Structure formats: structure tokens, C-alpha cells
Amino acid sequence: MKTRFGKKPLIVGCIGSAALLRRCAKKIPADCDLVEVRLDLTGLCGGAWLELCGAIQRQGMPVLLTIRDAREGGEWRGREAERLALYLAGLKKVSAVDVEISAHALGILAQEAHRRGIAVIGSFHDFHGTPELARLRTVEIRGRAMGADVVKIATMIHSSGDLARLFAWPESAKGPICALGMGGRGGISRIALPCAGSCLAYGSLGKSTAPGQWTCRALAKEMARWEVRKR
């Protein structure tokens, strides 16, 4: 199942618990175009995680596999070789993967994913603030050089200046991007940036997996209101 990332934004429903993963495997959720399985949060579900991802895919819902490293806000604290092995195993059952641009594993995984026709998201997270535009552009260049089809940048928003820098990035981007602001003041970016060039909007299906995250239902309603996505 191929996932295409273009100008029209897609809503990503975030799965952050084993119970929610099992529920979605039985019945796919509404108000999203694909689901992100945060394996660092769900755990391996007694070894059943791969089959659960496959069950979601068989119902026509693409799965994005993410195993977020603790250094960028996730819960993965194991060895990098073990994480890469999980990602490689997941390529049998998912439509896309997300790896940090700072991770050496991105280049290795991107090569194998592309061989199988699977999309790659290279991500960057800054939980302290929003870097200058030049820094954001450098991150994008590095991500694309390592094989990312989509470059995702998520930054903490403390001020209007942070928001302005994040909003300036899509205009100069050289390919598909995902930009989003975190924190209470970044909430507006969750709907505004998909209207301004970000190809992905992340929403919660249960408990929020990031600060300032909207629910998928709220995102779908607002994006329909702004006529950037039909509900």
C-alpha cells in the first residue's frame, strides 16, 4: 500500500498505547488518513505488534512506524542496532517509517525502505524553542541527503517570533515537508501549517503523544472548514 505525500495534507492518527493499537487492529479509526504506530510507546505487545500493524493495513489504513529515540522526546532507550532491526522487520507490514535525521540508521533504513517502495520521513525535534530559519534549512538539506521523502520539523513555540520562523520555512522547502509547533502557544500551527504547505497533520486518537496536539476529530473538522481536506 503506497502512501503519497503531496500538497494536500493528510491527517495522521497517533497510536501511543498497546490497548489502542489492539483496538485499531480490530476497527480502523475515523478522521485520519493513516495511523502512526509509536512502537516506543506501545511496546511490542507480546511479540504481536507486527501482526497488529498488518491487520490495520489489511483494512485499507496505511501504517507509519515510529520508534522515537529518547533524545528527541520518545521512550526508546535501547541499543540503536535493536531499533534498526525492529524498523527493518516492520518494512514487511507498514507503508511508511519515521526516523530522526540525527540518527545514523536513517540512511540505512531509507535505502531498504525505498527498495520496497515504502516512504521515509526524516524528523527533527527541538523541545526548547525554534531555531533560526537557516538552521531549519540545514536540517532539511541533511534529511533529504540521507534519503527522507518528507522532512518533518517539530519545534517548541514560546513566542510570536518562534511561530514566524516556523511559518517561514515551507516557502523555501525543496520537497514535501511536515512542520508543526509544540506547546500551548504552538496549537494554532497544528491547523494553520497544513493550510500553508505542511503535508501532514498529527492528531491524537487517545492520549496525546506530543504537547499541543489536537484530536484527529478536531483537525478533520477544521481542515474541512478551511477546505484543505474533505471530511
Image (cartoon, helix red, strand yellow):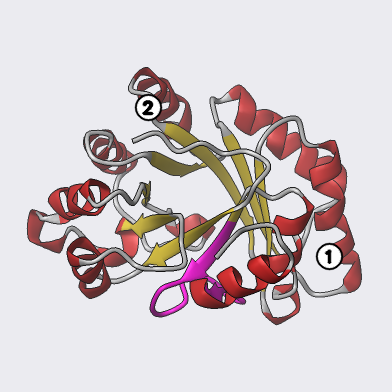
> Does the magenta portion include 204?
yes
Residue type beneath disc 2 = Ala
In this rendering, does residue 128 appear at all?
no
Residue 127 position within the rendered picture, expressed as x and y whole percent measured from the top left: 64, 65
**Residue 181 sits above or below residue 48 on the image:** below
Which one is nearer the viewer's eye here, 5 or 113? 5
Q: Quadrant of residue 95?
A: top left
Sequence-first tag of 2 and 1: 2
Quarter that holds the N terminus: top left
Residue named by callout 2:
113
Residue 34 position within the rendered picture, expressed as x and y whole percent measured from the top left: 42, 53
Which span is picked out in magenta?
Answer: 201-215
Q: Residue at x 41, y 80 (%)?
A: 207
Q: Quadrant of residue 191?
A: bottom right
Whether residue 95 sits left or right of residue 55 in the image: it is right
Q: Secondary structure at mark 1?
A: helix
